[in-house]
Amino acid sequence: MTNTVSDKRLKQATALVGDLFAVDAWYEQQHQLVLSLRFRFEPVKSKRLLEDRLKLAGYTYSLSDIDQHLLLTLDPNPKLRIPRLNIILFVATLFSVYVLPVFLFNLGRAQSFSDAVSSAMDDLARGAGIEFTLALMSILLVHEMGHFVASRRRGIITSWPYFIPAPNIIGTFGAVIRSKSPFWNRRDLIEVGAAGPIAGWIVALFWLIYGLSQSAIATPYNVTSTTIPMVLEGESLLVKFLTPILAGPSVPGTFYAFTEAAFAGWVGMLVTAINMLPIGQLDGGHVLYGLGREKQHILGWIAMVVLIGLGFQSMMWWVFAALGLIFRVPHPPTLDDRKELPMPARVMGWASIVIFVISFTPIPFRN
């Protein structure tokens, strides 16, 4: 019988189950792939985890219990379907990023809530918020899809991104991806962990450069609803370097009036740096553990101390320090930490660390 299932598809399917089950046999049946699986761990939990992975990966499948085995029959060609919840959250975040920053800006200078709503509606009608929304959502989307594509490439099953709308000055808490399968080795950690920050940072850099080229020096008397007053105190190395070159050198008594695109690029740099903190399950924790294994534990605790110190200047760092404690500072091992790292993975990891160093903003918002 001629095999119609490619080696790549077979490898993907067996990798999907390999940590939970031993594959005793496989065969093809009417263009379907059938795997005879033997439980390695507790059957009920293993079966539930397998079903979660199969659904997230987009497989059409059926499961049958036969003696002490589980028979998995699936279409070896998964379909990438975006779940309804992910679409709803994306649309809700798109709306909150578009509306809330403009409304909160007006609320800060209006005499009443109704005045803020009226002013925000006028600003939105004049086009305020469109450029910021386009820029920020493109940064977040490319960041998360960087993780998604790298995960699928490495045979790690993750969800589509869940975007999170929020009542804050940028309208969102960002986005998250749920992982339903383990990291097989340190190469997985680095490629998946670094892909998002690198991809999102490139897009953020584009918006920052474009926005700064449209920004200018301003005084307190000529701030508009489509510009954001910024000073360079406490800024990242990259923003401090680019702003005077592209927007002009500042003089005493003035500040920089960032356009919406420049502000979105600034936010993108901040989000990238936060994700690259060398703590636990953050992208930086993945990368640092991939490069240095247990050295990440030391660097993670050093980062916690630094965040607590910076919190006296910008309280938001205390929030991330608390989250670090909740989700654990040390990164857990992969299934095979001993596997040697290829050079491309090392380069990718170090590139993401350089991005963190030049993009980290010590004092983004003063207390």
Image: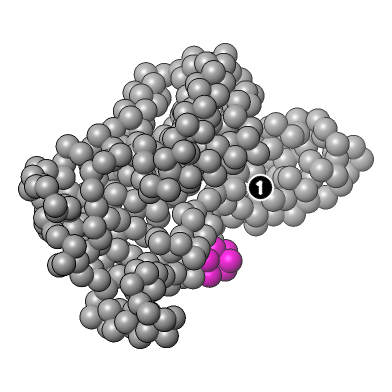
Q: Is residue 47 visible?
A: yes
**Coordinates of residue 241 in the picture (x, y in percent):** 17, 37
81 with respect to 348 (left or right): right
Considering depth in this image, is 168 or 333 the residue closer to the camera? 168
Residue ID at (33%, 30%): 357
**Residue 208's spot in the image, x, y percent?**
22, 50
Q: Whole-percent x and y of residue 281?
A: 57, 35
Residue 175 belongs to magenta span: no
Q: Indicate the amino acid at tag 1.
A: Arg
Is 50 left, or right, of 184 in this rendering?
Answer: right
The residue shown at (28%, 32%) is 358
Coloring basis for residues: one colour
Q: Which residue is mark 1?
A: 53
Seen as rendered, the residue at the extreme right is 67
Indicate the secondary structure of the residue bearing disc 1: helix
Is 104 drawn above or below residue 215 in the view shown?
Answer: below
**Image quadrant of residue 310?**
top left
**Is 86 included in the stretch rendered in magenta?**
yes
Residue 101 higher or lower than 218, as above or below:
below
Task: Examine the residues drawn in magenta and state their main secondary structure.
Answer: helix
Vertical order, 225 against 50 (above or below): below
Q: Which residues are magenta?
A: 82-89
